[in-house]
Image: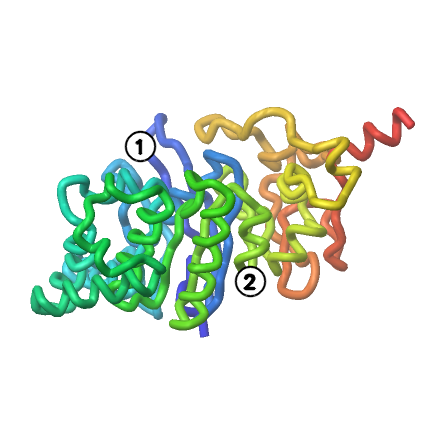
Amino acid sequence: MSLLEIKDLHVTYGSGAGAVPAVRGVDLTVGAGQKLGIAGESGCGKSTLALALLRLLPASAKLSGEILLDGEDVLTMKWGRLRAVRWAGASIVFQGAMHSLNAVHRIGDQIAEPLLVHRQATPAAARGRARDLLEQVGLPAARADAYPHELSGGQRQRVMIAMALACDPQVIVADEPTTALDVMIQAQILRLIERLVADQDISLLMISHDLAVLADTCDRLAVMYAGRVVEEGPAQQVFTGAAHPYSTALSGAFPRIGDPASRRAPRGLPGDPPDPAALPSGCTFHPRCPVALDECATTAGPELRDAGPAWQAACLLVRPDGGPVAEPGAEEARSTS
């Protein structure tokens, strides 16, 4: 059963001639207990997508399509119903905990707040639940009396996770939850999220620029470019044998331990993502694509096509066996060898 369904979602900032498309026709599904990762460079639309799920975007954003949470469209909910769904139906772990926590309130009070609002808990019960949640995410209950500045970055991120769990949501959206953390703390936070999702049978939508982290944490992986999903499939398969050249480039940017080739010749991707206000014609990736065909500059989209079992990619070169299109730079390497 699909717990979260995103159907033909479009998000545009501004209006008229100055309208900027940030998300363009995204379709995604997250099943009960499933972990879906969303990857892409900065500016690809992944954070806009996360905020759109609970209508947290500014008033300048125009949305169309459907966001079905347990069968109910978030985009058409009245304010009272939407307020009830936030925290209790779905909650968000934002990136940058220090910017999300209130600096003048103790963290126990901040964790207790959604319980007071959504569960009508008594103050004593809410404080007790807040202490239990802190222990659940690996912090001593006594830290409930601390202020955010008295905690380390990893501890603050654990507080954000505790807040997200407070009202037993069905879906948790984690937007770059480990970006500002060192690698040791990052690993601890990722394992914590995995354990909590498994123990409580929560669906996870995790957003990151780090394809390796998502491949290690999630069941499925969607790669976004210029506001569209260009590949979606089993996480490990997309990471190790991508069917879209952009996904291949993202994966190749991460050196692999024990692989001399990646250590001696780390791959990247030249150029920058396109300006959303001036997208190129045809496939928006073709100006940076190392294997682009002439028709890539004129063929709109292209639409997602089967690349293998439960695996799709939006590329004219995609193969039905799900194999990689080509290694970025492979043509240049062959021509100089």
* Sooner in the amino-acid sequence: mark 2 or mark 1: 1
Is 59 positioned to the left or the right of 289 in the image? left
Mark toward the viewer: 2 or 1 = 2
Tell me the element at label 2. Answer: loop
Q: Residue 83 appears in which quarter of the rendering? A: bottom left
Measure how far apart labels 2 and 1 are at the Cα level. 35 Å
User: Which residue does the image show at 15% across and 54% down from the upper left?
Assistant: 109
Residue 2 is situated, as x and y percent measured from the top left of the image, at 44, 70
Give the farthest residue toward the bottom. Answer: 1
Residue type for callout 1: Gly
- The answer to whether any part of residue 253 appears in the image is yes
Residue 228 in sight here: no
- Label 2 is placed on what type of residue? Asp
Location of mark 2 (residue): 219
**Label 1 crowding class (10 Å Cα cut-off): few <14, some 14-19, many 20+?**
some
Observer-nearest of 170 and 216: 216
Q: Position of residue 291 (x, y in %)?
A: 75, 35
Picture coordinates of residue 310 (x, y %)?
62, 64
Is 172 left or right of 57, judged from the image as shown?
A: right
Label 1 sits on residue: 14
Residue 22 is left or right of residue 108, and the answer is right
The quarter of the picture where residue 335 lies is top right
Image vertical order of residue 4 relative to residue 300, above or below = below
Residue at point 67% right, 65% down? 309
Q: Is residue 263 above or below residue 72?
A: above
The C terminus sits in image quarter:
top right
The residue at 14%/65% (across/down) is 126
